[in-house]
Amino acid sequence: MKQQKIYAYFDGDQNTKNLSGLCIELLAEQKNTWHELQKAYENFNNVKVRDLPCKGFSVRIQYNPKRITSSTANINSTHINKRPCFLCLDNLPEAQKGILYRNDYLILCNPAPVFFSHLTISCLYHRPQTITEHIDILIQLAFDLNHQWTVLYNGPRCGASVPDHLHFQAIPSGLMPIEKEGSDKKRSVVLKKIKGVTISRLSDFCREVLIIEGSDMLELLHVFKHILSALTRISPIDEEPMINVIVQKNGERLRFHVFPRAKHRPEAFFKTGNDRILISPAVIEMGGVIITPVEKDFERLRASDVEGIYREVSLGKDAINEVLENLE
Ligand SMILES: [Zn+2]
C-alpha cells in the first residue's frame, strides 16, 4: 500500500472523524491539488439538464460529453485483459489520493462527475466486480456515509465500466428522481415482510424495481441474499444476475432499490447513423438520471424513447413475480 496515496483513514472507530465530512474534505483538497479533477468539475458546471415527464414518473436528462468513455466502455473480456486497470493503485494519477476505508477500500474522487460531488469506492485489490460476496460492505458503507450520501452499485454486465475491479460509487443523496418516487406511498405496493424487512415494488414505472427496507444489518443481508439467489435461478447468464443497486439511509433505516436487468444496452445503442441513441443504462440511468454524451440525443429524446429503453433493459413483470414466489 502506497502511503502517499492516503489522504485520511476511516476504520469505524468512534474517535475518527465522521466519514461524510471526510469525503467533503477530500473533494475540496483534490480539487485544489489535482488539476484534472479541477478541470472536470469546471466542465461539469457546463452540463445541460432538462426534465422529461414520462408516463407516471419523470426523468432528468443530462448532456455530459465527458461521459463518452464510460458510456461506450468496451467490457469485452479480451479487451479488458489487455488494458491497464485504472482503478488499480499503481495506475492512479499521481495527484489522486483517497480515504483508506476499513483497511480494504480507497474512497476516491471520480474524475468524470455526473453530480456536484461524485465518489468511487474502490477495493485495494484487483478482484472482479460482484455483489454476492460484498453485500456486507455495501450495507456498511451506506451506514457509515449516513443520510448525506447515496451509495451505488453496478453489476459487471450491466453498467460497470471497470468490471474487473470491485468498486462502488457514492453521490449526494436526493439527486435522483427514484429517491423521491421510491418513497411515494401511493405508488408503492408492499409485497412481503420478513423479520422487520419490507419488500415492495413501484407501480407505473416502466421498469421493475424491488425496494428492500429495514434497520437490522443482518436481516437486510439475509433478505438481499435470498433475492439474489431467486434472481440467479431465473437469470439467463451463468454469472451473478444482472442488477443495479441504489442504497440510501433514512433515519435508522436503509432502503435498497434493486433493478433486475434483462440486458445491458438497448438495441438503439448498436444502430448506426441517425438511428443510434447513445445511452448505456447503468445505475444512475435506472435511478432516473439519463446521461447523454451526444448533444443530438439530449435534444431529441422523447418520453416514449425513455419508456421503451427502460422496458427493454429491465427484467419483465412475470420474471419478477417468479422471483417473489421463490422467496421465503
Ligand atoms: Zn484493478
Image: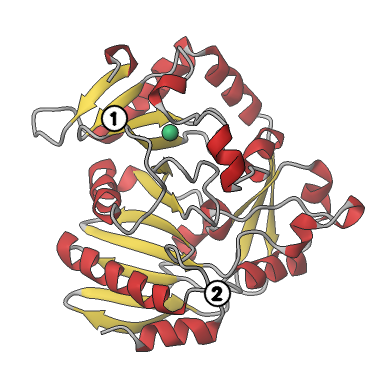
Residue drawn at 14 percent across, 27 percent down:
16
275 w.r.t. 19: above or below: below
Determine whether the residue tagged by mark 2 lies in a helix, strand or loop: loop
Reading the image, the residue beneath label 2 is 315
> In the shown orientation, is residue 254 left or right of residue 238?
left
> In the shown orientation, is residue 232 left or right of residue 237?
left
Q: How many labels does the image show?
A: 2
The image quarter containing residue 194 is: bottom left
Is the residue indicated by label 1 positioned so its CB lies within 8 Å of ligand 1? no
- Give the image quadrant in which the ligand numbered 1 is located: top left
Instruction: Name the kind of residue labelled 2 in the image.
Output: Leu
Q: How far apart are marks 2 and 1 (CA)?
A: 38 Å
Q: Position of residue 220 (x, y in %)?
A: 23, 65
> In the shown orientation, is residue 39 left or right of residue 214?
right
Determine whether the residue tagged by mark 1 lies in a helix, strand or loop: helix
Instruction: Name the kind of residue labelled 1 in the image.
Output: Gly
Sooner in the amino-acid sequence: mark 2 or mark 1: 1
The image quarter containing residue 302 is: bottom right
Residue drawn at 47 percent across, 33 percent down:
117
Residue drawn at 30 percent across, 26 percent down:
99
* Near-viewer residue (157 or 141): 157
Reading the image, the residue beneath label 1 is 21
Q: From where the camera sits, is residue 185 visible?
A: no
- Colour theme: secondary structure
Q: How crowded is mark 2: few (under 14 residues within 10 Å), some or many (20 or more)?
A: many
Camera-near label (2 vs 1) is: 2
Residue drawn at 59 percent across, 43 percent down:
78
> In the shown orientation, is residue 134 left or right of residue 151?
left
Q: Where is residue 228 in the image (x, y as percent from the top left)?
A: 35, 69
Q: Do the residues labelled 2 and 1 touch (CB within 8 Å)?
A: no
Quadrant where the N terminus is found in the figure: top left
